[in-house]
Image (tube, helix red, strand yellow):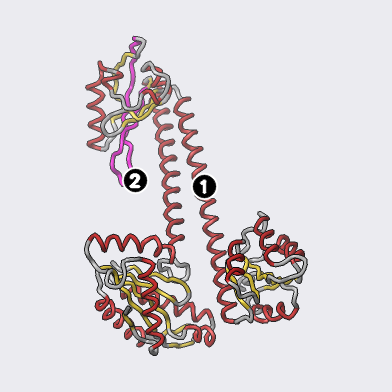
């Protein structure tokens, strides 16, 4: 069986200089399907018609410059989601700031570095794919929530339509709600008027018996069915009923309340079955929503390539760990790790091998680290380990052992065998700083020292 053809992502190159289009095309044509436009008006038309995966946009163009093109693309709902990378000879910080303010995802200056261009284009296309997946998850979650709300309204309508009296209680036997028939039997207009009341408030002549039924159901987790008796409604009418008490269970099996119903004995079976079916459907919908929420949260905090925590998770976690370290009077070491000569791996063996090396190091760090350590991929070939309770010296001993072990490993991918090393830098709270941002900056400076001193080493930050 023939394997399916993998379609190349489509890129749109916008530049009024044919030579610039040719240079960018030469860098990208092997991996991407390329479209080009030599002016802003043509770019807007092509983008709206083809919806490319990414747009490379020059700034200085006649008639309609790149800033105006970007602004119109972002204002159009059809094209607003397309990531835009400005490629320009303008080097001023104000130019970059304006580009990002208009909605660009990146800014590359001319002359172009082929490896940098490929890396950034690939990174932003992967990010767009992940964003599209997250959007799909969010849309699916929204749909499930709508379905659950519809099911809830349907259940209430069913409960109000069936000719029986239905109620539900908390574990203390206080009423949480009921259908309108039960409310009317007790002289009130709606379920809201029942909430918080007890059997002693509503049916004092049978309160002790009803409380005993409720206690049995809650303590045993077993249903009490077909308990025959009589009640007197608020208008003095004596009514013979068949009373059923059913435990309401959480997903772990614990009893969180009671659902009850009473009816004429002749109608007992059919209405009880309808109530149970509606209850199961509602619990199923709620379980699906919880599963989708967990899946969406996990996707948002994980690096898609390595499975490690990502920069977003680090931003949410670092201050929490610093507060924990402060409460417990413990050090917290940040270890910045960078693969040595990683660009040469990509250039020599290709990005697929480079990705394999990143995944290999990620698995190695995750395996070697303690369960209390947090291992993140910050981007590119850069990783970070947060070591709670480790002094700078303790962290250096551990990470230096990691470094030695990793240097002795061989990575094999697609009949290619490579050996890699990494460099690391360490900064520690509170020894070096008590600020989370500065802690990361200091660990990065220590990493720079390791690189400057020959790589394949671990350095501690010094003021």
Q: Position of residue 89 (x, y in %)?
A: 65, 77
Q: Residue furthest top?
A: 236
Magenta segment's dominant SS is strand
Q: Is residue 35 visible?
A: no
Q: Is residue 246 magenta?
A: yes
Give the magenta range.
Answer: 236-262
437 up-or-down from 173: above or below: below
Q: Position of residue 215 (x, y in %)?
A: 23, 31
Q: Residue furthest bottom?
A: 454
Residue topped by disc 1: 142
Q: Earlier in the sequence, mark 1 or mark 2?
A: 1
239 up-or-down from 327: above or below: above
Residue topped by disc 2: 251
**Tag 1's secondary structure?**
helix
The image quarter in which residue 2 lies:
bottom right
Front residue of 325 and 282: 325
310 up-or-down from 244: above or below: below
Drawn side of residue 145 relative to residue 114, left or right: left
Q: Residue at coordinates 67% horizontally, 70% vertically from top-left?
A: 57
Q: CA distance from mark 1 to mark 2?
A: 22 Å
The image quarter in which residue 331 lies:
bottom left
């Amino acid at each position: 069986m023939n394997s399916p053809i993998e379609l190349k992502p489509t890129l749109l190159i916008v530049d009024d200089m044919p030579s610039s289009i040719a240079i960018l095309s030469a860098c990208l044509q092997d991996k991407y399907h390329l479209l080009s436009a030599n002016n802003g008006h043509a770019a807007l038309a092509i983008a709206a018609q083809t919806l490319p995966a990414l747009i490379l946009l020059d700034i200085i163009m006649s008639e309609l410059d790149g800033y105006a093109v970007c602004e119109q693309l972002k204002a159009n709902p059809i094209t607003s989601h397309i990531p835009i990378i400005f490629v320009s000879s303008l080097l001023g910080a104000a130019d970059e700031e304006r580009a990002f303010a208009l909605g660009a995802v990146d800014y590359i200056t001319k002359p172009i570095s082929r490896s940098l261009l490929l890396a950034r284009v690939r990174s932003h296309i992967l990010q767009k794919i992940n964003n599209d997946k997250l959007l799909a998850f969010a849309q699916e979650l929204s749909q499930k929530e709508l379905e659950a709300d519809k099911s809830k309204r349907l259940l209430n309508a069913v409960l109000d339509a069936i000719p029986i009296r239905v109620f539900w209680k908390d574990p203390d036997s206080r009423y949480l709600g009921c259908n309108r028939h039960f409310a009317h039997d007790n002289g009130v207009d709606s379920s809201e008027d029942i909430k918080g009341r007890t059997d002693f408030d509503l049916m004092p002549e049978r309160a002790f018996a009803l409380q005993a039924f409720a206690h049995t159901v809650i303590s045993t987790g077993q249903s009490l069915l077909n308990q025959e008796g009589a009640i007197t409604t608020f208008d003095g009418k004596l009514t013979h009923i068949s009373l059923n008490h059913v435990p309401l269970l959480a997903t772990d099996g614990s009893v969180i309340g009671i659902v009850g119903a009473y009816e004429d004995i002749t109608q007992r079976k059919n209405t009880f079955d309808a109530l149970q079916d509606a209850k199961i459907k509602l619990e199923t919908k709620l379980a699906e929503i919880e599963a989708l929420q967990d899946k969406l949260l996990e996707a948002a905090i994980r690096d898609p390539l390595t499975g490690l925590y990502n920069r977003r998770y680090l931003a949410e976690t670092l201050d929490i760990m610093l507060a924990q370290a402060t409460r417990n009077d413990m050090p917290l070491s940040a270890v910045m790790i960078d693969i040595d000569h990683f660009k040469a791996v990509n250039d020599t063996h290709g990005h697929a091998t480079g990705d394999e090396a990143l995944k290999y190091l990620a698995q190695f760090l995750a395996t070697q680290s303690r369960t209390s350590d947090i291992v993140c991929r910050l981007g590119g070939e850069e990783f970070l380990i947060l070591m709670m309770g480790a002094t700078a010296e303790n962290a250096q001993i551990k990470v230096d052992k990691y470094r030695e072990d990793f240097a002795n490993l061989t990575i094999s991918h697609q009949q290619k065998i490579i050996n890699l090393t990494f460099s690391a830098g360490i900064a520690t709270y509170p020894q070096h700083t008590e600020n989370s941002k500065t802690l990361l900056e200091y660990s990065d400076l220590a990493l720079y020292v390791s690189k400057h001193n020959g790589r394949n080493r671990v350095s501690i930050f010094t003021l």
